[in-house]
Amino acid sequence: MQVFVTGASGHIAAAVIPELLANGHSVVGLARSDEAAAKVAALGADVHRGDLTDPDSLTAPAAQADGVIHLAMRHEIAFSGDFAAAAASDLAAITKIGAALKHSDKPFVGTSGSMLLAHAAPNRVGTEQDVATGDFPRVESENTLIALASDGVRATVIRPAPSVHSDLDKHGFVPTLIDLARTNGFAAYVADGANRWPAVNTRDIARLYRLALEHGIAGSRFHGVESEGIPFKQIAQAIGRGLGVPARSISAEQADRYLGFLADFAQIDNPTSNDWTRATLGWQPTAPGLLDDIAAGHYFA
Ligand SMILES: NC(=O)c1ccc[n+]([C@@H]2O[C@H](COP(=O)([O-])OP(=O)(O)OC[C@H]3O[C@@H](n4cnc5c(N)ncnc54)[C@H](OP(=O)(O)O)[C@@H]3O)[C@@H](O)[C@H]2O)c1
């Protein structure tokens, strides 16, 4: 297939594009700058210049492709406090790409996040069948994309764990937690740190994107998580060992001070099943898990 990949210069695409190319697909990657274009070309993909702030720029490459993987997200505004604007751009992009694919039966693999299960499945393990509703981050985008299944699009969504990790991860939640721990002089967790965060290795989730593109059944949600979840305290302890600083409990009131924009995320209990994803797509995570990956040392180099 010729696959149009948005977010092609980003972290997850750095594994998705090689995964696609190694399995006989060709890739056209979206880039909004010369720097992004150089990264996309270095991965072996063709470049399409465009921008999420100009959703019309997505129509032609989507229409010309045999399938689309949507990874772009305006993180710089999302994580500086305007998640609503980032979500609106995401929704506009999904709507444009969806319109270009209507009645084509082509695959369109989108991205949301396992953390929306904190709303869809509070106080229990979230499954792929749980559907989020309400005014929460990424919910409208996910549901809009899935609804394209009734418009002749083979629409599927991957919900990645909050910590997609590997040596390709330079600015995700794990490096951010490490920077905070370095600044604070300790690795913080809130209260007893028993709240669970799932994780997934970038190489494993790259394979999941390919499998969803090739085999995903229209209207499916898939979970990009290597296990149900890791207590946040264990993640803090692994970071502390890597930095040579202690892991320390803080109160919820101290979270803003020590965990910055991650204060709320760091307190979410997000146990997430991948049973249906494994069974449906034959996906098996095989790369090192989060704690082993942190212990490997590359995050502290
Ligand atoms: N990594 C994780 O732990 C994780 C967890 C849950 C969900 N996700 C989701 O997975 C997707 C991919 O994540 P990632 O880690 O690969 O993100 P990333 O490394 O931050 O990459 C984001 C991509 O979006 C592009 N982008 C940003 N603003 C754009 C704009 N205005 N127009 C066009 N492209 C733009 C970036 O291009 P530039 O290179 O030009 O900046 C980059 O290619 C995102 O939706 C993310 O929210 C990730």
Image: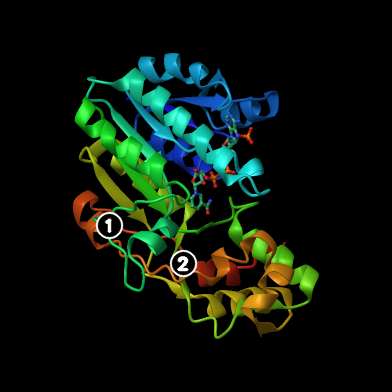
**Which one is in front, 65 or 40?**
65
Closer to the camera in the image, 247 or 54: 54
Q: Residue 70 falls in which quadrant of the image?
A: top left
In the displayed structure, would residue 173 be above or below residue 125? above
Q: Position of residue 236 (x, y in %)?
A: 61, 76
Location of the C terminus by quadrant is bottom right
Q: Residues within 10 Å of mark 1 (few under 14, many from 20)?
A: some
- Asked where in the image residue 250 lies, by quadrant, the reply is bottom right
Would you say the beta carbon of the disc 1 residue lies within 8 angstroms of ligand 1?
Answer: no
Q: Which residue type does callout 1 highlight?
A: Asp
**Residue 265 place in picture, x, y as percent:** 55, 64
Q: Quadrant of residue 285?
A: bottom left
Label 1 vs 2, first from the N-terminus: 1
Report whether 149 appears left or right of 243. Answer: left
Alpha carbons under labels 1 and 2: distance apart = 25 Å
Q: Amino acid at mark 2?
A: Gly
